[in-house]
Amino acid sequence: MAAAKEKKIVFGMIQRDGDLRVHHVTDARKATLQPIIMANVAKGAKVYTDEAHAYTWMYKGYAHSLITHSLGEYVRGDVSTNSIEGAFSHFKRTMGRHVPQGQRPPLRPLLANVRVSLESQEHRRRRTRQRIAARDERA
């Protein structure tokens, strides 16, 4: 149980084809996450989450849809949490490559590096999509 207490909690939000925002938080409760969400997500925006209780308030003020992982649901039409889960997967891979086993580095620089890395990947994807679109227009 001691290992669970040592884990750091990272909360993230990602806009489809847009910004990634990550925050080191003390817990995943509504009282902790709500102010972060309200400061970073425009009222009325489409928001996709999992079924965590911390998000139940979002039906008021947001176009909130949820994915019920506990029932085996991962995608429903446009609704999924795959973008943020992919970002966290990338973060964990980065941690494994750059952090010696058993050491706990400061999170802030690691999170900043992941943000930059993901933004670079997205920039390359956009450029590729633009090139394909231009090629298709010429054809």
Image (cartoon, helix red, strand yellow):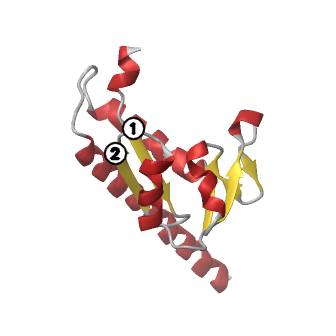
Q: Is residue 122 left or right of residue 100?
A: right
Residue 103 in the image, given as x and y percentages of width and height: 23, 24
The amino acid type found where label 1 is placed reads: Ile
Q: Is residue 44 above or below residue 106?
A: below
Residue 77 in the image, given as x and y percentages of width and height: 77, 58
Q: Is residue 121 visible?
A: no
Q: CA distance from mark 1 to mark 2?
A: 6 Å
Q: Residue at x 71, y 44 (%)?
A: 74
Q: Residue at x 61, y 59 (%)?
A: 58
Image quadrant where residue 118 sits = bottom left
Q: Is residue 29 above or below residue 57?
A: above
Residue 56 in the image, given as x and y percentages of width and height: 63, 52
Q: Residue at x 58, y 81 (%)?
A: 134
Q: Which mark is residue 9?
A: 1
Q: Is residue 135 left or right of residue 68?
A: left
The residue where tag 2 is placed is: 24
Q: Residues within 10 Å of mark 1 (few under 14, many from 20)?
A: few
Q: Residues within 10 Å of mark 2 (few under 14, many from 20)?
A: few
Q: Is residue 116 visible?
A: yes
Q: Are marks 1 and 2 in contact (CB under 8 Å)?
A: yes
Q: Count of labels shown?
A: 2
Q: Nearer the viewer, residue 18 or 59?
A: 59
Q: Is residue 105 above or below residue 20?
A: above
Q: Nearer the viewer, residue 116 or 53?
A: 53
Residue 85 in the image, given as x and y percentages of width and height: 54, 45
Q: Which mark is residue 86?
A: none
The amino acid type found where label 2 is placed reads: His
Image quadrant where residue 69 sits = top right
